[in-house]
Image (cartoon, rainbow, N blue to C red):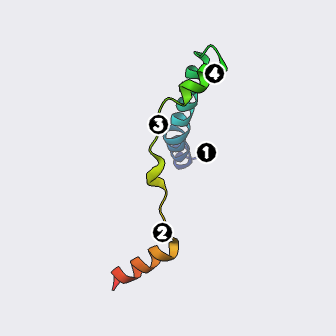
Amino acid sequence: MDKEKKRKRNLVLNGIAIPIGNMVFQTYLVGAGASSLREAIKLFWTFRVPWGWTYTARTVADLKKAYVKKSY
């Protein structure tokens, strides 16, 4: 394997695989500390995440129209 391929592989490993692996391991540690299924579910549902920002009523066609108007 040449140096460029190794560099790219290491970049992917360090940038993606390690953080995901860390997240899975931390989740395991939280779940392993729970004494029952009820407690584990309560632990994982403790934090409220503001998902309201993810929904937009716009469509791709609306965004395309807005882009075309601005580009002239």
Mark closer to the chain start, 1 or 3 = 1
Residue 21: percent from left, percent from top: 57, 32
Q: Closest to the observer: 12 or 35?
A: 35
Q: Report the residue marked by disc 3.
A: 48
As drawn, the residue found furthest toward the bottom would be 72
Mark closer to the chain start, 4 or 2 = 4
Q: Closest to the observer: 28 or 8?
A: 28
Q: Report the residue marked by disc 1.
A: 1
For the image, the number of numbered tags is 4
Mark closer to the observer (1, 4): 4
Mark closer to the observer (1, 3): 3
Quarter of the figure with the N terminus:
top right
Q: Report the residue marked by disc 4.
A: 38
Q: CA distance from mark 1 to mark 4?
A: 49 Å
Mark closer to the observer (1, 2): 2
Q: CA distance from mark 3 to mark 2?
A: 25 Å
Report whether 50 appears left or right of 9: left
Q: CA distance from mark 1 to mark 2?
A: 47 Å
Three-letter code for the amino acid on which mark 1 is drawn: Met
Three-letter code for the amino acid on which mark 4 is drawn: Arg
Classed neighbour count for the residue bearing mark 1: other residues with Cα under 10 Å, few (<14), some (14–19), many (≥20): few
Q: CA distance from mark 4 to mark 3?
A: 18 Å
As drawn, the residue found furthest toward the top would be 35
Q: Is residue 1 above or below residue 26?
A: below
